[in-house]
């Protein structure tokens, strides 16, 4: 049989009951039998979009991979698969369309050629891309799940629901990156590869082919290895701009780059129990792949790119000429080859020196920043201590002023008391008027020194308070300056003991 489809059409809810067993209602999350292509049987979690169609891609009665398709942009949001194996040879790149995306009432229950679908499907191309959209453009139909990684001997991956517009050079680089990562890094670091879950996707830009099919801004890949006690999860991003190499990113960072903020794997693929050593080995291979891409860019030429692709590339290798080289050609090759090798050696040396120079500058910058942070922390601590001391001194001024005021008030009250005694005696005992008048100057003169003493003590207290505040402030400043100088001097002595 030809490849069959199990569609989950989220945007056409009203027509979901017309095709029993093929369409899944929007409220029913998942991809049906294709849920096994996702970690823990759970598709990426995120806000549902009316223009997204869930497709369980089938071939020869078996599920091959799962695709979430955007009818708004006419490109897949992502395709999910697992356990990639070497592809069989001789597959015919025959691009097919899905009739039921455009016409849920269509009698065609299988993917079919566009020419055949035109005769029986109404509004063909209203929700999906067509082969005619790419005619006369500089873009190819690039597979998110390449045939080179598929175990399907037929054409399950050659559907336009698994394709996005790519330039020829970018398509070759994308296939080369996928093949290299799967063959050299992801599969070897995940046991036999049976527990390796892969999701590849595309983020649309504002540009379109034929004003219909969105051109990806970048494509991405997320990998989850579910091997017990040795799993890991990583993400990769490749922008469609020229000479952009594939970049490795953490899984959470990749999820932030996606427009719908999907959670790609349940519990982030068990991030609390991941094998960091395997992730380091994967990153080493990624660096090698990046260096190979940069070298291809520096050498230039599509022939180098074609020869660098793995044997699992979806595109056929270029034909080689059977003509022998002439004597002059061999002589020129004998002379030019050492020069080319010398240029390559100089390039590798220059690149290595530049890389380690950047590492050294980064290390020095990091040390300087750490030193500045330490100095600023100590300076801040000393400043806070100084202001706390000043605050305590200023807070004690009202108390001291209150004490002086109480003493002055007490002295004034004593004088008033004496005056009241004199008045009482003058009024109560007239006989003793002369005696009281005679003694009044004595009491008054005796109280004057006491009052003067209290006033003087109050003024002395104020002056003492002002001097204490001034000297306290100057002492605090000198303490801060001394502390900073001492710390800086200690840091210099510790960093450069030989020079001192």
Image (spheres, helix red, strand yellow):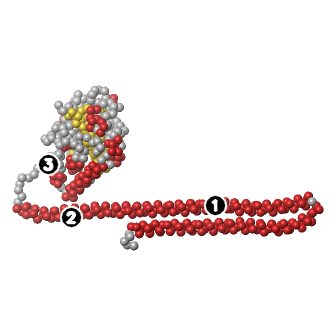
Mark drawn on residue 396? 1
Viewport quadrant of the N terminus: top left
Q: Position of residue 256 (x, y in %)?
A: 35, 46
**Residue in the image at 37% along x and 61% along y:** 366
Q: Which of pointers 3 and 2 lies earlier in the amino acid sequence?
A: 3
Q: CA distance from mark 3 to mark 1?
A: 90 Å
- Contact check, label 1 and label 2, Cβ < 8 Å: no
Q: Which quadrant of the figure has residue 413?
A: bottom right
State the residue position of label 2.
Answer: 346
Q: Residue furthest bottom?
A: 500
Secondary structure beneath label 1: helix
State the residue position of label 3.
Answer: 317
Q: Which of pointers 3 and 1 lies earlier in the amino acid sequence?
A: 3
Q: Which of pointers 1 and 2 lies earlier in the amino acid sequence?
A: 2
Q: Nearer the viewer, mark 1 or mark 2?
A: 1
- Which of these two is toward me, 175 or 241? 175
Q: Position of residue 73 (x, y in %)?
A: 30, 41
Secondary structure beneath label 2: helix
Secondary structure beneath label 3: loop
């Amino acid at each position: 049989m030809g490849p069959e489809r199990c569609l989950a059409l989220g945007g056409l809810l009203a027509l979901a009951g017309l095709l029993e067993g093929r369409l899944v209602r929007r409220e029913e999350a998942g991809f049906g039998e294709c849920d096994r292509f996702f970690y823990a049987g759970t598709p990426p979690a995120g806000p549902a979009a009316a223009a997204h169609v869930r497709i369980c891609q089938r071939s020869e009665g078996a599920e091959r991979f799962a695709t979430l398709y955007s009818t708004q942009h006419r490109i897949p949001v992502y395709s999910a698969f697992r356990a990639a194996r070497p592809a069989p040879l001789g597959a015919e790149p025959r691009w097919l369309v899905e009739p039921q995306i455009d016409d849920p009432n269509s009698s065609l229950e299988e993917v079919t050629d566009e020419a055949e679908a035109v005769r029986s499907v109404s509004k063909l191309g209203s929700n999906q891309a067509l082969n005619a959209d790419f005619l006369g453009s500089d873009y190819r139909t690039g597979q998110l799940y390449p045939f080179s990684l598929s175990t399907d001997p037929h054409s399950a991956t050659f559907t336009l629901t698994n394709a996005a517009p790519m330039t020829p050079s970018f398509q070759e680089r994308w296939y080369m990156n996928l093949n290299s990562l799967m063959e050299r890094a992801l599969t070897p670091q995940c046991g036999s590869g049976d527990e390796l879950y892969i999701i590849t996707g595309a983020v649309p830009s504002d540009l379109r082919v034929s004003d219909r099919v969105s051109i990806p801004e970048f494509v991405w890949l997320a990998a989850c290895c579910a091997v017990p006690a040795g799993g890991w999860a990583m993400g990769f991003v490749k922008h469609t701009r020229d000479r952009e190499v594939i970049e490795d990113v953490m899984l959470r960072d990749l999820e932030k780059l996606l427009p719908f903020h999907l959670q790609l794997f349940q519990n982030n693929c068990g991030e609390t129990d991941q094998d960091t050593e395997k992730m380091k080995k994967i990153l080493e291979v990624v660096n090698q792949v990046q260096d190979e891409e940069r070298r291809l860019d520096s050498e230039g030429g599509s022939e180098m790119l074609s020869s660098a692709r793995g044997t699992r590339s979806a595109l056929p290798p270029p034909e080689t000429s059977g003509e022998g080289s002439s004597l002059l050609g061999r002589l020129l090759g004998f002379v030019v080859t050492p020069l080319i090798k010398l240029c390559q050696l100089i390039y590798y040396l220059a690149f290595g020196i530049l890389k380690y120079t950047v590492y050294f500058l980064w290390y020095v910058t990091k040390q300087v920043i750490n030193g500045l942070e330490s100095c600023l922390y100590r300076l801040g601590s000393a400043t806070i201590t100084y202001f706390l001391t000043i605050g305590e001194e200023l807070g004690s001024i009202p108390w001291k002023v209150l004490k002086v005021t109480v003493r002055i008030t007490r002295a004034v009250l004593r004088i008033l008391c004496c005056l009241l005694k004199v008045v009482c005696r003058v009024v109560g005992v007239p006989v003793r008027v002369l005696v009281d008048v005679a003694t009044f100057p004595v009491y008054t003169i005796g109280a004057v020194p006491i009052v003067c003493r209290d006033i003087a003590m109050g003024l002395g207290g104020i002056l003492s308070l002002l001097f204490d505040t001034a000297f306290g402030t100057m002492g605090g400043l000198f303490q801060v300056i001394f502390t900073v100088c001492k710390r800086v001097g200690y840091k210099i002595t510790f960093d450069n003991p030989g020079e001192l």
